[in-house]
Amino acid sequence: MKEFELINRYFKGRGITRRDVNLGIGDDCALVTVPQNCQLAITTDTLVAGVHFFDDIEPRALGHRALAVNLSDLAAMGAEPTWVSIALTLPSIDQQWIEELTDGMHEIAEYFNVQIIGGDTTQGPLSITICAKGTVPEGTALCRNGAKVGDWIFVTGPLGDAGLAIESRKQGLTIEPEHLKHIKKRLNFPTPRVAAGQVLRGLASSAIDISDGLLADLGHILNMSQVSATVNIESIPTSDAMKASLGFEQQLPFILNYGDDYELLYTVPDSNKSMLDVKLRQYGVEAICIGQIKSGEGQIDLLHKGEKFTFKHQGFEHFSKDLS
Amino acid sequence: MKEFELINRYFKGRGITRRDVNLGIGDDCALVTVPQNCQLAITTDTLVAGVHFFDDIEPRALGHRALAVNLSDLAAMGAEPTWVSIALTLPSIDQQWIEELTDGMHEIAEYFNVQIIGGDTTQGPLSITICAKGTVPEGTALCRNGAKVGDWIFVTGPLGDAGLAIESRKQGLTIEPEHLKHIKKRLNFPTPRVAAGQVLRGLASSAIDISDGLLADLGHILNMSQVSATVNIESIPTSDAMKASLGFEQQLPFILNYGDDYELLYTVPDSNKSMLDVKLRQYGVEAICIGQIKSGEGQIDLLHKGEKFTFKHQGFEHFSKDLS
């Protein structure tokens, strides 16, 4: 199958058709219209086989995940996702596999009303690079540098599940079937917190998505905002699967260091705290407070039942982690 | 070196700073402002080692080329390039190599006043995916579907040089040193026809960049426009290097089938033909007429000195060509 036939077959004329897309797949470029008084938010992320996912991942999950991690970055800015470009590098053409992969992409794209406006397919070692775009009303984007002393620190959901799914396979941990199912779903079909991100505009002072782990990503906010933080470990939400599978100490690397769940981490001024819960609940998202911003220069003090707690920081980093 | 340090070191705070970039590298997304009454043009292209370039390519050329092929797509729409996102997948960290690669990127980005607004670096087999964005005044973009019967067919420059450079290495052809230097430069440091593309707004009825070869890319225009064409082979411009290195018959696969020179192919109504040369010359680009649009359904008739000429069409396709 020739390159442009592959794009035509699996992407052109399929999925969402947005009115702000003036020209979709099939020319040298796509053409889109950004609404007046909106800024365009742009992010790009690559997923490489054996680095970001197991080689034998089900293709539908890979399609979902590749889009989800990019939409999560838009969510963390409070942007509304609008359009994505997809660059696929495939070792060979397995039509069934590609069909399932693109089904996974179309499903999540439709769910979030996102149009696939362009793509490129090339032969080579399996990887997917997506460039996702979204719009945000001028001046309302959630940045990393807005956290202020006294702000409360929140997350949108349980942490560590995706990491537990990865390590349970790599290390051969024994996990109850129902819990294994849950954490695998969290790894393979993460939900980018798009609605929550948009609700947080005007409420949150800063936001980031947890892709590299809570401590690493909180560190980014602290460094950019030139503040410090205390985090109450026992306030960090975890799933039933996590609680049932691991003891307190064992959970810590997953909760604090692993990312890949794509929950949002954000800070809220005290004056907005009461509004937050009401607004987020309308979108089925809980506001879970895990700590507070303090003055300082990027330090994170962990507290456990009010006592200082020592834990070796170690964020997830590419060029060091190997799934294969 | 950690991932975000790599982005910070080689991209953040370097290169062009555009006023329409509200937030550059360093947050979950970049934020940019699209001018009123402009559409946004978006394209994405991946270059994979061993498929789109020789494994031992000089990194500065790779950086240039990766950006150039994307800017060429913007040129073919008549768009003004504005911002690019760069996703780098590297097998390992060789600082000197990365420095030269990113130097090559920054050089061409600066030349075209393009800001690098985001990136991702991951470990894996060498490849580069770029998503390039540009702006074009509403309704003036050059599409592939506008060619009309009677329009003249033009190219912006000599064809076949890049292909000759590739095949001379693969097949071990003997080429004079000065000519070899020329074709290698055409392969490694192609010039996207950005200025020409913008000049062609309002003059050309359709345009495309020749990445897959003249016949394949003209075929795209013909199919989208539902017309046919005649092409005068002897009118197709070639370099001195090509003329000196190969006989007429030998040149044909390079001129007709190879792409990779990133010249523009475009059609112009007879009424605009006289304007064309004057306008393009101001930007140092020649208007070279190679044929005419006829009625029909996507056929290309080749003429040689007025006589019908038979040549087996065979466009460049990924999944079939192998540089390694």
Image (tube, coloured by chain):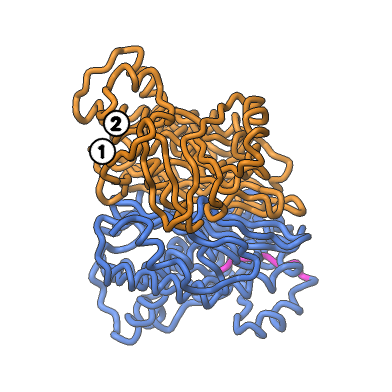
Chain colours: A blue, B orange
Q: Circle 1 is placed at which residue position?
A: B323
Location of residue B53 by image quarter: top left
Q: Circle 2 is placed at which residue position?
A: B166
Report the chain holding disc 2. Answer: B
Residue B282 locus on image (x, y percent):
66, 25
Report the chain holding disc 1. Answer: B
- Neighbourhood count class around disc 1 (C-alpha, 10 Å): few under 14, some 14–19, many 20 upward: some
Residue B171 locus on image (x, y percent):
19, 29
Q: Identify the residue at horizontal 21%, vertical 30% (top origin).
A: B170
Front-lying residue, B99 or A182 = B99
Front-lying residue, A167 or B110 = B110
Location of residue A268 by image quarter: bottom right
Quadrant of the snapshot with the C terminus of chain B? top left
Residue A79 locus on image (x, y percent):
65, 65
Does residue A276 lie above or below B175 as drawn?
Answer: below
Residue B95 locus on image (x, y percent):
40, 31
* Residue B38 located left or right of residue B197: right
- Tell me where the magenta segment starts and ends, as one range: A264-270
Amino acid found under the numbered disc labelled 1: Leu
Quadrant of the snapshot with the N terminus of chain B? top left
Check if mark 2's residue and mark 1's residue have beta carbons within 8 Å: yes
Q: Identify the residue at horizontal 64%, vertical 61% (top origin).
A: A77
Q: Is residue A249 visible?
A: no
What is the secondary structure assignment of the residue under circle 1?
loop
* Residue B162 located left or right of residue B14: left
Please state which of the two labelled residues, at mark 2 or mark 1, is closer to the viewer.
2
Q: Earlier in the sequence, mark 2 or mark 1?
A: 2
What is the secondary structure assignment of the residue under circle 2?
helix
- Magenta stretch holds residue B172: no
- Is the magenta region chiefly helix, strand or loop? strand
Front-lying residue, B69 or B60 = B69
- Magenta stretch holds residue A266: yes
